[in-house]
Amino acid sequence: MSTTKYQPLLSASGVRKVYSKGEVKLPVLKGVDFNVAPGELVSIVGQSGSGKSTLLHLLGTLDRPDGGEIYFEGNRIDNLAAAGRDILRNRHIGLIFQFYHLLPELTTIENVLAPVMIRHSVLSYWAKRREYQERAKALLETVGLGHRLNHKPRELSGGEMQRTAIARALISEPQLLLADEPTGNLDRQTGDEILEVLRRLNAEQNLTIVMVTHDPNIAAGADRTVHLAEGRVQAASQAAA
Amino acid sequence: MYKLLLCWRYLRTRYIALASIISVTLGVATMIVVNSVMDGFAHEMQGRMNDVLSDVIITSRSLEGMANPEWHMAEIRKVAGDDVVGMTPTAQVPAALAYYFRGQYFTRQVTVIGIDPETYSSVSKFGYYLQHPENREHLDFQLKEDGYDVMDHQAEDMRKVKPREQMKQAGWKHRRANAEFEKRIAVQPPIQTAAQENAAATDDSPFATAPAPVQETFDPATEQHAGTVLGIGLCSHRTADGTDVFQLLPGDDVEIHFPSCGRPPEFRSSKLTVTDFYESKMAQYDMQYMFIPLDKFQEMRGMIDPQSGIRFVNAIQIKLAEGADLNAVRDKLREHFQLHLYDVSTWRDMEGPLLAAVQTETLVLNVLLFLIIAVAGFGILAIFFMIVVEKTRDIGILKSLGASSEGVMGIFLTYGFSLGIVGAGLGIVGGLLFVKYINEIADLLGRATGTPVFDPAVYYLYKIPTIVEPFTVGWIAIGAMLIAVLASVLPAIRAAKMHPVQALRFE
Ligand SMILES: Nc1ncnc2c1ncn2[C@@H]1O[C@H](COP(=O)(O)OP(=O)(O)OP(=O)(O)O)[C@@H](O)[C@H]1O
Ligand SMILES: [Mg+2]
């Protein structure tokens, strides 16, 4: 991993984030330095309230840092205009969350297709809808949900919802997948299954994954674990892959 | 793409929003119905006015009238040219109508109009309003044996017509029966039969009004005086259940008292025999006008110059070609004729205040009804705010998937617009159906409640007139949709401004 001068897929340097409630300033991130190499599966661990989610939101351009810089494929992304950030989230960075965050009005396959629909106008979507649908079906097969295409989220179990969310995050073939406690709401076994899906994607498709988790068991499944404490990244410990 | 899909899903799952557009629907439907009925009534009214009045009328400002109508008509033809399709001279004078009914003496204020039976029907629908079929074809001011309409021939639906049983008697039959009765009780007819039909009355002659010493024997059973067509409202009234009760019938005699054309005007009287009724269904005309032949009128009032034989008339009524510009013709005539002598007006000018009142009424009603739709807009606004709050997390999700703020705003604007389309669409369909079956609905309501909703006895119309103006329907629909979109703007902006992280954290 330290052969040539490698370019990180994602890098954060000196990232700071302060929440202010009136006069009270609450610094959550106080200068996070952090690199992710292409093809890595990194887990971020830390106490509740240590700012893991906050960091992930900054990396995923859902929020802007108060200081520091974030680079994606060598390009600075933390100060991009809204349109650029929308495109980034739509095509290059996949996001999955603890509470799945599926759209309740849409079926499984429609949820998976949502990013594609957001990208395309009615006409260009309609012209290629077969192709997109095939792709969504294939993805759902990959995550093991090929048989529940037309169910609404409320008819699915937690594990199934998270699989749907993963398929949705992958529909645009992103280079990077950011996952915020993807197993946090699932029982041990289901959590392991989700982790297995992520590991397989990482191994087979060389997908770079950054995963926030509480669970040391899950964290152990990653190539590398990053500890977040007191607003900074603590000494990183290498995990045996 | 996702906008349409989500809109569609929201439409199908959020019935509360549909509830909010019911008021839009009702507002649109009501506006369509009200406008159609108002247009229908206005059209009916204007149609009648224009049927009763000619297009343009030139009136002399003096009751003495204008000399030589032929010269005037030639001048009009010179000025207005091809636009003129019909012209007729008329004369008129305010008068008192007097008659006996059940031994009691009645007088009424009338306007006596002298018409030329040959040409009068060419400028207005006068003939159509008469009660005897032969008179409708050709008016001759002669009493008919019988055959006067018992059923109102102007009604579209004969089932709603109350037969006028008295009219079965009308005609010579009635006149002979009267004469028989008078003879039997051997009382002199209350109206003096002194002949006052001295034809050659001159303007200034002091002898003009002196009764001619011709004592003729007049047999009312076989003879009639000069004929008159009486406005139907002058001698009848309508009871609460819609039956017409007549005090006079064709065949009865009446007397009129009017000023002559002399200087100063003198009082003259003349006996007439009612030969028909005039029913335009415009109360102000039916209760005011009575018609006699123009030459008879001119003789009675002394409107013939004794030396030259030149006749005088009060007005010339002009019928213009279909589509001719009334106001342009009027203005040309006003330039040509000296305005201190003549008044030139179109029928719209003459009924200006009434038409303006109807127009104002329509406008005010429209403003009020549109306010109802605007109120519905606030309902949409409130419910949209609720939906935006409820959908906060979804908005965060969409943004995390790369939806732009404009895109999220678009969802709710499209949503509002589709609600507007649904609301206005249903309103249009409902309104048009209501208009189409309005008479059936009125009948049904009338039967259910026991009192007729639309009483022909009151309105002189047998059914509710309606006109659907596509243009009006169009702007009502556009207005309703605009309001729905405007009402969704604020909630949509709020949705667009939501911070994705806050939205995702929203519980
Ligand atoms: N909008 C906000 N305003 C003020 N404080 C906030 C806001 N969002 C987060 N915080 C605070 O920032 C800190 C970090 O929150 P964050 O959600 O990143 O923690 P976390 O590490 O993900 O915790 P958990 O493991 O429980 O998910 C918390 O103390 C939280 O209270
Ligand atoms: Mg968290």
Image (spheres, rainbow, N blue to C red):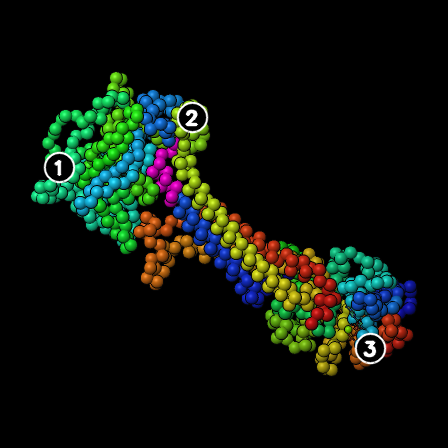
Q: How many discs appear? A: 3
Which residue sits at x=40%, y=47%?
B40
**In this orientation, which residue lies closer to the viewer: B503 or A121?**
B503
Q: Is mark 3 within 8 Å of ligand 1?
A: yes
Residue kind at label 1, given as amino acid type: Pro
Q: Does the magenta stretch include residue B53?
A: yes
Residue wearing tag 3: A47
Check disc 1: other Cα within 10 Å, few if <14, some if 14-19, many if 20+.
Answer: some
Q: Does the magenta stretch include residue B349?
A: no
Check disc 2: other Cα within 10 Å, few if <14, some if 14-19, many if 20+.
Answer: few
Mark 3, chain letter? A
How far apart marks 2 and 1 lie (CA) works out to: 47 Å
Residue wearing tag 2: B339
Which residue sits at x=21%, y=38%?
B254
Q: Are marks 2 and 1 on the same chain?
A: yes
**In this orientation, which residue lies closer to the viewer: A146 or B230?**
B230
Residue wearing tag 1: B220
The quarter of the rendering in which ligand 1 is drawn is bottom right
